[in-house]
Image: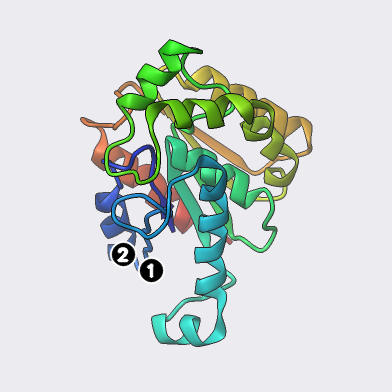
Amino acid sequence: MICHGLPGNEKNLDLAQAARRAGWNAVTFNYRGSWGSPGNFRFAQNPEDAASVVEYLRAPSNAAALGIDTRRIVLAGHSMGGWVTAMTASKDSGLFGAILISAADMGRTRGTGEQLVASMADDMESLAGVTPQTMADEITANAEAFSIGNAAPGLARLPLLVITSDDGLAPAVAALVEAIEAQGGKNIKTAHFATDHGYSDHRMALESEVLQWLAGLK
């Protein structure tokens, strides 16, 4: 199950198809208020939406209809979706594993004040019920609650694949890995690619890394 970033222009559908070719079911979805989904977009509700999709997949009738082994659900996310994955997976010990791809810490975003508003203006395509100011205000008001470091204790229970690139997010992700290890997390595989945030020239390498890790899950 793949969680997209902000606003979600890159949905990693090639990764979803690669997973399907390898024998996995692949599920993508849009958060409330994004890309035509009903409701208004809010950062705080994105992990709730991801948890709701997991709950849907676990429902016996849905699992039977879709051919899902509910014991082997892996949550993955890119950028903001990596944050969504971390926050969701940290509260769900029933997941089979989690994949963080250039995870963004929504409690530690780019700039403050006008800088943050300008950043949100570049990231609000196809989001309903928001303005750059309201998005910046929500992040500022919830900086502590949104910190990805809060997920460390829960993530220590799960097998993790953590992938980074040369997009400036790697140091914060490395700090998260250290925090998870400090909480006793031992099953963590890391990989770094010298490429951009969208892994533009490393898509096949990204797919290979993910599929190899998935194949090794037991």
Q: Amino acid at mark 2?
A: Arg
Residue at (48, 33) in percent of width and height: 103
**Whether residue 51 can be seen here:** yes
Residue underneath mark 2: 20
Residue 85 x, y percent position in the rendering: 53, 47
Q: Amino acid at mark 1?
A: Asn
Residue 106 x, y percent position in the rendering: 54, 30
Residue at (67, 48) in percent of width and height: 90
The quarter holding residue 198 reads top left
Q: Are marks 2 and 1 in contact (CB under 8 Å)?
A: yes
- Name which of mark 2 and mark 1 comes first in the sequence: 2
The quarter holding residue 5 reads top left
The quarter holding residue 182 reads top right
Near mark 2 (Cα within 10 A), the count class, few <14, some 14-19 or many ≥20, is few
Residue 129, placed above or below residue 95: above
What quarter of the picture does the C terminus occupy? bottom right
Q: Is residue 97 left or right of residue 39?
A: right
Residue underneath mark 1: 25
